[in-house]
Image (cartoon, helix red, strand yellow):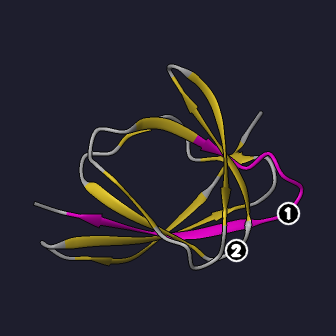
Amino acid sequence: MTKAATPTLQSDTPEARVTHWHFPPGSATGHHRHEFDYVVVPLTDGVLTAVTASGRIENRLAAGKSYFRKAGVEHDIVNEAETDFAFVEVEIKR
């Protein structure tokens, strides 16, 4: 059974929601759909796997190298590595 990744809400205002995500080895977010555009800021280097309806995609991430995605993304994010991973997610509310 996959462990749940740990979200820690840092800020939630009418403009944005900021969440710190911690992924121990073998953990996952669970399948979800993003209702807002969002930015991810990796805090560590590593690989996370996105599980989508189309299949599995390994994403190599680097600390401090942020990326943006539009609302509507559906996936489960899984840490299949043997080390912890963490990122900050900033959801941009409309």
**Foreground: disc 2 or disc 1:** 2
Q: Is residue 4 above or below residue 16?
A: above
Kindly indicate whether the residue at mark 1 contacts the one at mark 2 (C-beta within 8 angstroms).
yes
Where is residue 27? Give x, y as percent.
71, 49
Q: Is residue 4 found left or right of 71 in the rendered image? A: right
Q: Is residue 54 above or below residue 72?
A: above
Q: Is residue 5 above or below residue 52?
A: below
Report the magenta residues as a range: 77-92
Where is residue 48? Give x, y as percent.
68, 50
User: What's under tag 2, amino acid-wise?
Assistant: Thr
Whether residue 79 appears in magenta in the rendering, the answer is: yes
Q: Quadrant of residue 32?
A: top left
Whether residue 32 appears in magenta in the rendering, the answer is: no
Question: Mark number for residue 36?
Answer: none
User: What's under tag 1, amino acid-wise?
Assistant: Thr
Query: Residue shown at 24%/53% (left/top)?
Result: 36
Per the image, the residue denoted by label 1 is: 83
Where is residue 82? Give x, y as percent.
89, 56
Q: Is residue 93 found left or right of 69 in the rendered image? A: left
**How far, Cα to Cα, is label 2 from label 1?**
10 Å
Query: Residue shown at 26%/55% (left/top)?
Result: 37
Q: Considering the image in quadrants, where does the N terminus appear?
A: top right
Per the image, the residue denoted by label 2 is: 44
> Looking at this view, is 93 or 39 the one in front?
39
Query: Residue shown at 57%/69% (left/top)?
Result: 87
Question: How would you rate the neighbour count of disc 2 (Cα within 10 Å): few for under 14, some for 14-19, many for 20 or more?
Answer: some
